[in-house]
Amino acid sequence: MKVNVWDTYVRKNDGTLMHFDILAPIEIIKEETIFQYGDDYLTTKEVQIKSLSTSECRLCHMETAPEEVVTSIQEKGYHIIEIQNCD
């Protein structure tokens, strides 16, 4: 499965910068959908922001997803890769 990788940086409630990638099938072209995936993820981390926009989340590149990412996408529509300060 080909996925787009959306590079995302968000300022957490304590002021630290949180970095994660949102992976979604290349067929999903609406930025609003990707932003909603990010907002859903941030809710699970109890990070409160208004909502994601192009200033925090940008399309970075396309790649072929490994099997565990494909499984995650099949279950919820997207996959998150936590990179920095996501705990």
Image (tube, rainbow, N blue to C red):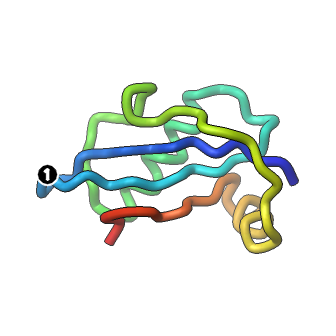
Q: In the visual, does 27 lie left or right of 76?
A: right
Residue underneath mark 1: 15
Q: In the visual, does 31 lie left or right of 47?
A: right
Q: Quadrant of the C terminus?
A: bottom left
Count the marks.
1
Whole-percent x, y for residue 53 in the image = 42, 28
Q: Is residue 45 above or below residue 20?
A: below
Whole-percent x, y for residue 5 in the image = 64, 45
Residue at horizontal 28%, vertical 61%?
A: 46
In this view, the residue in front, 11 or 40, is: 11
Which residue is outermost to the left? 14
Secondary structure of the residue carrying tag 1 is loop
Circle 1 residues within 10 Å: few <14, some 14–19, many ≥20: few
Which residue is outermost to the right? 1
Q: Quadrant of the N terminus?
A: bottom right
Residue at horizontal 55%, vertical 62%?
A: 81
**Circle 1: residue type:** Gly
Residue at horizontal 84%, vertical 48%?
A: 2
Q: Quadrant of residue 25?
A: top right
Q: In the visual, does 59 lie left or right of 7?
A: right
In this view, the residue in front, 73 or 3, is: 3
Whole-percent x, y for residue 41 in the image = 46, 56
Q: In the visual, does 67 lie left or right of 59?
A: right
In this view, the residue in front, 6 or 70, is: 6
Q: Quadrant of residue 66?
A: bottom right
Residue at horizontal 67%, vertical 59%?
A: 76
